[in-house]
Structure formats: structure tokens, C-alpha cells
Image: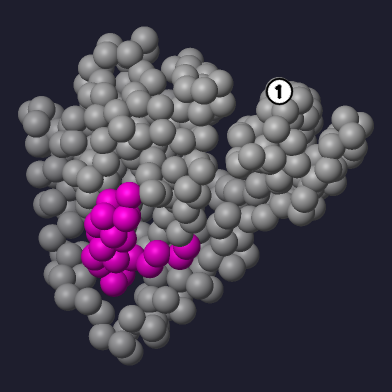
Amino acid sequence: MEPDHRNKIAHRKAILVTSLQVLSCPPAPKAKTNLSGMHSKFIGCKLYISESRNTMAIDAIDRAARSNPQVAVISKFEDCLYNRVRYTLVSYIINDSSTGEVIYSPIMKVLLTMMEAAFSTINLELHSGAHPRMGVNDDLSFHPLGQATMEDAAWLAKQVASDIGNDLQVPVFLYGAAHPTGKSVSAIRRELGYYRPNYKGNQWAGCMLPDILPMKPDEGPTHVSHERGATTVGATPWIENYNVPVLSKDVATVRRITRRVSGRGGGLPTVQALALFHGDDCTEIACLLDPDHVSANQVQTVVEQIAAEQGLEVEKGYFTDITKDRIIDKYFKIACAD
């Protein structure tokens, strides 16, 4: 561990002494029912892990995800064809009363425990699937909820990224509000060749990164472990995951549709979209969208219109995660029920 990192940890522990005295034991049931009164700032995190077929690995990660009752697993989505799982977690944030800066959230330790469980049970060299990835723990995003600010989310993202890079010795690339210039995760991925399949023309297998990275990570080593890969960590507004199945094996044609749907291709603003082979007769358009700017219905309509021009049939899309308007309510229900 680097000296500067040890100093950061010591400073963080010193600040937390008073707050942690209150949090050292799980809150009593009555305290949990008053959770909304105790806290007004919350953080949502989405952790994407490159595995869904290895039951032993998923069980270990599940146990880590539920290791603290003050952190709720809001949803979990697995896709065996993509060989990928996403966990959505929510917890509260505590700010320093004098400076207003974030000093603690129980979600930080839970996330690191989950990532350690993934690293101990998954070998990226043995992994393959129809979804791009560059690490065992492929991506971790932080989203402010309630009265939390983007600055709160960025602070947490940077702290966890520092721990991943220094303690777990995995290269970490920051994005969104956690990056000094607000660089997007898609820009980072394009520079690293993330979107280029390296197996059977439309799949990814093994570690797709070189031993020495072509760009310097924000945290961690420049050398890549082929067993662990690298990770992206960022802070953004809440993002919704919406997939639209197109009944076609012609991935190239669906990719052209995808470009016209995405914001980068001149389509719907803020929408990020990716065409992915998904079974014998289907290619999915996997979309990330900001619900404050674009709705899933808009995405569905545009995809159907463009696909019709190509003579392709489109099925009704589906959300892979809980929507923004339901997340806090679900968190309170889970936290108060435990």
C-alpha cells in the first residue's frame, strides 16, 4: 500500500470515530422504521460483474452483498448469454456537520467485499459471453438519491476507486462526475477497445486488454492481471437499463439501427446503445437512458420505426432494473423489514 493511501485511510478513520459509534450495531427495528427521518441523503450503486454461470461465484457475491443490513440489495439481474450479473444497492450517506463533505456510507465496505468475493471466485481468462467486458468487476456506478448531490456521489466513487486500485491492485478508470473533466465511460471504453469482439465475431473471451495499458489509469497499476482485468468507476445521474429484442441474427444491420437510436449517432439525446447477439434468432439493443430526458417508450418507438424500414420485427423491450421513481420506496421497505 502506498504511503499517501495509508494517510488517506488514517484521516478517514479519524473523522469517522464519532459517527461510527452510533453505527457500530445494527439499528433496532424502531430506528429502521424512522430511517427516512434519520437520513435524507442516499446513494444508489450498480455493480456489473462478469459472471452468471458459475453458481459458486454468484453465491459468494450474494453473501457479500447482504453482509450489512444497512445496505439493501434493491435488484439483481443475471443473463447467462451475456454471462454477466448486475447488482443494484442502496444505502444512506453521512456528511460532516461542519464542512458538508461526505464522511461515511456503509455501502463502501459492502462493495469492496463483493468485489473481493468476485476476484476470489472468477478468472477472467476463463470467461466468455456475448457482452463486452474488460474486468471481473467490469463497472461500478454511483448515483445520488434523495437529497444527495452529484458531489457526494463523486466523492464516494473516488474513495472506492482508490481502495480498488491500491488495495486490490486493479487498474481503475474514473468517469462522469468522478473524473476531473467529466469523461464518459463510453469514451474510455472506446480508447481501450472494449467494444471490439475477440471471439466468434460477436462474443468476448479471456482478457481483452494488453499487459501494459495504452492509457494511464486514474488509480492502481498500469500492468493488467489477465485474471482480474480492469475496472471503470463513475458518478452519474440515475441511469435506467432498457433492452429491445430485434428478431434477427444480422448483428451488422442491428448495429446500424443502434447507431441511429443513440445520442452519439444523432438519435435520442443521452441514450447509449449497443447491439448484442442474444441467442439463435435475436439481437438485442441494450440501452442506457437518463429517465429525466428520454423515456423507454420513446426508445421503443424509434427502434420499431427504424427496424420496420429494414423489414425487421421488434419485440417489446424490458427493463433490467428498478426504475428511479420506485427505488427509494423499495429501499425503505427492505431496510425496515430486516
Q: Quadrant of the N terminus?
A: top left
**Among the 4 quarters of the image, the one containing residue 37:** bottom left
| Amino acid type assigned to the residue bearing label 1 in the image | Ala
Residue 44, above or below 210: below
Relative image position of residue 219 (x, y in whole percent)? 27, 27
Q: Nearer the viewer, residue 200 or 172?
A: 200
Q: In the rendered image, is residue 152 in sight? A: no
Q: How is the image coloured?
A: one colour
Q: In the rendered image, is residue 316 in sight? A: yes
SS label for mark 1: helix
Dot 1 corresponds to which residue? 252
Left or right: 22, with 105 as reference point: left
Left or right: 212, with 191 as reference point: left
Which residue is at 33% across, 65% downward? 71
Residue 242, above or below 183: below
Relative image position of residue 309 (x, y in whole percent)? 91, 32
Relative image position of residue 292 (x, y in whole percent)? 69, 50
Residue range in magenta is 54-75
Which residue is at 26% across, 24% downward? 226
